[in-house]
Amino acid sequence: MKPLAERMSRLGTETAFEVLAKAKALEAKGIDVVHLEIGEPDFDTPSNIKYAAIEAMIEGYTHYNPSQGLPETRAAIAEYFGRKRGIKVNPENVIVVPGGKPIITFTILALVDEGDEVIYPDPGYPIYESVANFCGAKCIPIPLREENEFRLDVNELEKLVNDKTKLLVINSPQNPTGGMLTREDLKRIAELAVKYDFYVLADEIYSEIIYEGEHESILQFDGMKDRTIVLDGFSKTYAMTGWRIGYGIVPDHLIDHMVRLETNFNSCTTTFIQKAAIEALTGPQDAVRAMVEEFRERRDVIVDGVNSIPGLSCLKPKGAFYVFVNIKETGMAAKEMEEFLLNEAHVAALAGTSFGKYGEGYIRFSYANSIENINKAIERIREALARRG
């Protein structure tokens, strides 16, 4: 049997699904496990969105549509984005795709040649590095440090940039830390992008899940409309992870190439789901506001709980639904702690190293679970660490 393509050895994965499988195996043995590993809202998709999808199917929206997306869906996204960000966007610059990951993949495929450098946040969503590495890029991590509230240091970023830098990935609010870049951070990053002529992929998928301050987009700054690709979608805001629908805001000179990639990879995004997406953006937003308020309560509970356990500590995240917990005082490595929590406390969580080498010394908890289960997890962790001594 001839071997696989060499590039397959450079393709990573998401550890969350591996931990989920281990947790499910324990549950199959009758063991109760608290799930703090998966990064998806535990709320149901709002009913108005589901009914919109059903109505669209009944009306016949079950066939192909343009690879770039339905014109009416792109118009709704452009209007929503402009209203929320205060930045005018044309529907011609919107591409609708099955989830957020295609925007990551298409951006890197369209822009990055083998040997080009891609700077990405570490700890950060692992798919950034995985796809860049798969495409033959040189991957350069920019550390996100707890002492800087898990924001990248712009001065440190400038030291990493050179004439081979093709793309910078930013994510705010951020997975796995819940950190947020400030307006001043983004302004300075924009100045660097213009000065050194590199693109920015701005992952804004958690833009609506914010507890302090306002979401800011790098797209607002001078010179950035021609060099920024914004990633956003419906999975987190509307609890639509399984629907697989996201979108990109793409510069004029790049949009046709992104559409060509969508044609080659997916043909198009499901038609009736796009009709439901219009309802998500234009219909009542009460469910979104209620979800964010519930996440805020859960955040406060889990932060207070973690900080009450000897050997653990964490900052209070400003967005998303994760806490990045400092475990250094326990003396355990991140992966060791992941295994310990699952097998001894029956709490599923993710090692910080699942998000890059700078995640060593940390564990990520997703608080997309009930307050009752969060409190149960906190007590189990407290008791397991006390038994360990």
Image (cartoon, grey):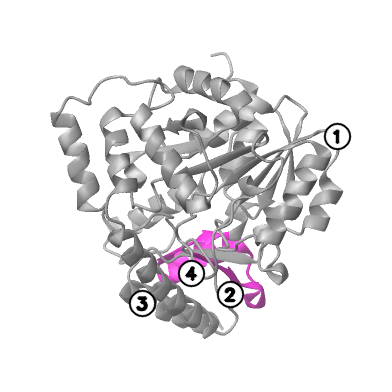
Instruction: Tell which tag, 3 or 2, sits nearer the viewer.
Output: 2
Point out the frontmost of discs 4 and 3: 4
Q: Earlier in the sequence, mark 4 or mark 3?
A: 4
Nearer the observer, disc 1 or disc 3?
1
- The answer to which image quadrant residue 313 occupies is bottom right
* Distance between the alpha carbons at the discs numbered 2 and 1: 37 Å
CA–CA distance in space, label 3 to label 2: 18 Å
Which kind of residue does numbered mark 1 sit on? Asp
Residue that mark 3 sits on: 376
At 36% from the left and 34% from the top, the residue drawn is 73
Q: Return the residue at label 2.
A: 314
Please name which of the two marks, 4 or 2, marks the residue nearer to the observer.
4
Q: Nearer the viewer, residue 204 or 249?
A: 249
Q: Earlier in the sequence, mark 1 or mark 4?
A: 1
Percent of width and height locating residue 62? 23, 24
Give the secondary structure at mark 3.
helix
Kind of residue indicated by mark 2: Cys
Residue flagged by tag 4: what amino acid is it? Tyr
Mark 3 / mark 2, whichever is N-terminal: 2
State the image quarter where residue 79 is shown.
top left
Kindly identify which numbered label has been placed on residue 211. 4
Report whether 353 appears left or right of 51: right
The residues colored magenta run 322-351
Q: Choose the circle earlier in sequence order: 2 or 1.
A: 1
Residue visible at 67% across and 27% down in the picture:
111
User: Spatial distance from mark 1 to mark 4, Cα to Cα?
Assistant: 38 Å
Magenta stretch containing residue 328, yes or no? Answer: yes
**Mark number for residue 38?**
none
Give the residue at mark 1: 163
How far apart marks 1 and 3 lie (CA) works out to 51 Å
Whether residue 59 is visible: yes
Crowding at dot 3, Cα within 10 Å, few <14 / some 14-19 / many 20+, comes out as some
